[in-house]
Amino acid sequence: MTTTLRIPKGPIDGLGLHVGDTLQVLAVEDGSILFSISHNDPAAPSGSASEWLKSAKGSVHLANGESPDALRLEYYAGKYGIGE
């Protein structure tokens, strides 16, 4: 099912969204929503979170019990100011 809504762009204006980008809700928590943005860029690499971690900044060392997905979500939260 797809729902299309029009919302004011004020809170998300700084995310650099363009026509064709996709937002995916990852978590809904007290007072905030964590989501990822897939920009409509045909030249962008695709693959698993592990591949992204290796290609984004070189070698990444995960803490004991930390998953690549958790680290990727933390990166996006900091980059886009989500959860502040």
Image (cartoon, grey):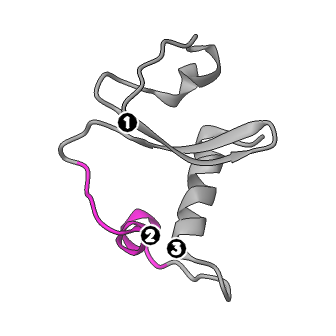
In the picture of the structure, the residue carrying the numbered disc 3 is 68
Residue 51: percent from left, percent from top: 35, 72
Residue at 49% across / 12% down in the picture? 6
Q: Is residue 6 above or below residue 56?
A: above
> At which x and y percent is residue 9?
56, 14
| Residue at the (67%, 84%) spot, across then down | 63
Quadrant occupied by the C terminus: top right
Earlier in the chain: of badge 3 and badge 1, it is 1
- For marks 2 and 1, the one nearer the N-term is 1
**Segment tinted magenta in the rendering:** 44-59
Residue linked to disc 2: 53
Inter-mark Cα distance, 3 to 1:
21 Å
Q: Is residue 15 toward the left or the right of residue 58 in the image?
A: right
Which residue is drawn at the image coordinates 58% and 57% (left, top)? Answer: 73
| Residue 67 to residue 8: above or below | below
With 34 as the anchor, is 72 left or right in this view? Answer: left
Please tell me whether mark 3 sits on a helix, a strand or a loop: helix
Q: Secondary structure at mark 2?
A: helix
As helix, strand or loop, the secondary structure at mark 1 comes to strand
Tell me if residue 19 comes above or below residue 7 in the rendering. Answer: below
Q: Which mark is residue 22?
A: 1
